[in-house]
């Protein structure tokens, strides 16, 4: 998602015209940003792009008008600090793709013993995210114990955000969903070649 100072009223992709957008060099968020512009027919040349780091300093120092990050990270940190920001979710403007996936070594998957390990990891991840979905407060308490350096208020803000993002049921990705995702990525010019669902996902 894209976040900005609330008073600047960047509420839709068209509001980016003439604005300064901070992009982290080498980050996948640049491709997601490209997808947002393509989906909304926004001329990229009419936006000033500025190279920035992962923190929010450029926005707070007014060197850019907007930054891109995942909602539960930098935006949640700013909200936890009491700052007024506006959030523009890409999913609300035509960029709806699958995410939150485990990447499995294909050769390892061919070995029954190693496949069993990968399946256990997948089950553990699903169990963890299910707890976040069902009870973000309890998940936040556990997360805070594992990462005691994180501000409690930040965890309190970010965990419900993650809970809202999770599909129901957890891990419910389908071949049709992947086909739709790949079709959308292709139509936005984000794939160098045609990719099939079988190349990127394992279907049981």
Image (spheres, grey):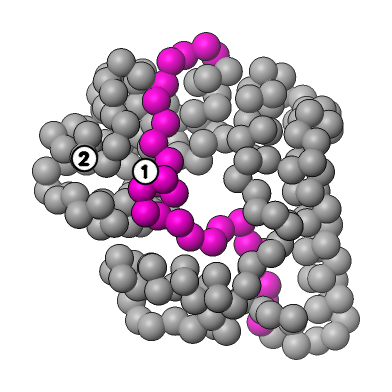
Q: Name the residue under label 1.
A: 24
Q: Is residue 114 left or right of residue 53?
A: right
Q: Nearer the viewer, residue 138 or 52?
A: 138
Q: Earlier in the sequence, mark 2 or mark 1?
A: 2
Place of residue 78 in the rendered image (x, y in percent of width and height, measured from the top left): 50, 21
Q: In this view, does 47 lie to the left or right of 142?
A: left
Q: In which quarter of the image is the C terminus?
A: bottom right
Residue 24 painted magenta: no
Quarter of the image containing the N terminus? Answer: top left
Q: Position of residue 203 (x, y in %)?
A: 68, 80
Q: What stretch is highlighted in magenta?
A: 81-106
Q: In this view, does 125 lie above or below 18?
A: below
Q: Which marked residue is nearer to the observer: mark 2 or mark 1?
A: 2
Taking the image as shown, residue 136 lies to the left or right of residue 184, namely right
Q: What element carries label 2?
A: helix
Q: Is the magenta stretch mostly helix, strand or loop?
A: loop
Q: What element carries label 1?
A: loop
Q: Which residue is drawn at 28% across and 23% down?
A: 9
Q: Check residue 14 in the rendering and tell me which mark sits there, or answer none.
A: 2
Q: Is residue 30 visible?
A: no
In the rendered image, the vertical position of residue 188 relative to residue 53, given as above or below:
below
Residue occupying image coordinates x 44% and y 49%: 91
Say if 184 sits above or below 198 in the image.
above
Question: Dividing the picture into quarters, in which one does residue 15 lie?
Answer: top left
Looking at the picture, how far across and down is residue 133, in whole percent?
A: 74, 43
């Amino acid at each position: 998602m894209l976040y900005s100072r609330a008073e600047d009223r960047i509420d839709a992709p068209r509001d980016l015209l003439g604005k300064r957008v901070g992009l982290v060099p080498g980050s996948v968020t640049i491709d997601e940003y490209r997808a947002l512009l393509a989906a909304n027919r926004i001329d990229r040349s009419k936006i000033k792009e500025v190279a920035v780091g992962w923190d929010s300093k450029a926005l707070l120092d007014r060197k850019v008008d907007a930054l891109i990050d995942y909602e539960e990270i930098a935006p949640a940190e700013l909200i936890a600090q009491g700052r007024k920001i506006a959030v523009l979710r890409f999913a609300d403007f035509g960029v709806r793709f699958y995410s939150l996936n485990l990447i499995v070594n294909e050769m390892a998957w061919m070995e029954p013993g190693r496949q069993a390990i990968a399946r256990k990891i997948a089950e553990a991840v699903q169990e963890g995210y299910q707890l976040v979905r069902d009870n973000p407060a309890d998940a936040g308490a556990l997360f805070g114990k594992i990462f005691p350096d994180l501000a409690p208020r930040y965890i309190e803000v970010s965990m419900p955000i993650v809970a809202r993002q999770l599909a129901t049921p957890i891990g419910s990705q389908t071949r049709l969903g992947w086909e739709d995702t790949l079709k959308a990525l292709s139509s936005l010019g984000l794939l160098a070649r045609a990719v099939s669902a079988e190349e990127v996902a394992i279907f049981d």
